[in-house]
Amino acid sequence: MKIGAVILAAGEGKRFGSNKLLANIKGKVVVQYVLDAVNMERVIVVGKYAKDLVEVIKNDVVIYNPRWSEGISTSLKLGIRFFLDYDGVLVALGDMPFITRETVNSITSKFSNECEAVVPTYRGMWGNPVILSKSLFPDVMKIEGDIGAKVVLRQREKICKVELGEEVVKDIDTISDLPSS
């Protein structure tokens, strides 16, 4: 099955107070960990900090979202439009530096025709990145505001789950979320 990846990197990071995607963890910026983990055909959706991110993502396909301030749904929809001909889209968040290639491989290997989505879990909690099948694209394109695809997924029965580690529920929202060196 053909899967593309959308990395969402357009947010403001209000609670962090600056561009959290460029925060340094052990000599590497947060978003670089995500780029390293998502080693597949991908597009990165940027917004508020587009100019600051250019150096890190200069070898990637980038979509600028001029409506980033209207919420994550606007970035999600732009990314999905890029992969409309694919069987599914892996949606990764740019502020989740703890995911690994193994994490992504575990999620993508679970994707099949029986799954409308693949959701990683940690102790029963839904996490990210998720895979959305093409059958969900029309409903996801109707989402508005600062909400993601979870609102669509909660209404579906054919959700395949894969239990993984804490990395699928751990992100960077504040400076205190950064690991100490």
Image (cartoon, rainbow, N blue to C red):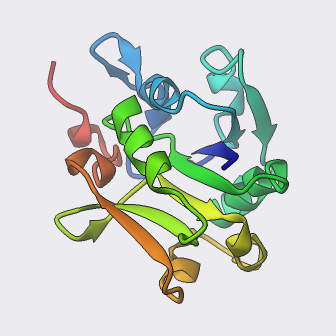
Q: Residue at x 58, y 50 (%)?
A: 90
Q: Is residue 105 above or below residue 123?
A: above
Residue 128 place in picture, x, y as percent: 41, 55
Residue 160 place in picture, x, y as percent: 43, 69
Q: In which quarter of the view is residue 42 placed?
A: top right
Q: Residue at x 74, y 51 (%)?
A: 79
Residue 87 place in picture, x, y as percent: 72, 57
Left or right of residue 176: residue 72: right
Left or right of residue 81: residue 69: left
Q: Is residue 103 visible?
A: yes
Q: Is residue 156 above or below residue 163?
A: below
Q: Residue at x 38, y 45 (%)?
A: 106
Q: Is residue 100 visible?
A: no
Q: Residue at x 35, y 48 (%)?
A: 173
Q: Quadrant of the C terminus?
A: top left
Seen from the viewer's position, the closer of residues 69 and 73 is: 73
- Label count reads 0
Q: Is residue 147 above or below residue 101?
A: below
Left or right of residue 83: residue 160: left
Q: In which quarter of the view is residue 98 placed?
A: top left
Residue 32 place in picture, x, y as percent: 48, 23
Q: Is residue 116 above or below residue 112?
A: below
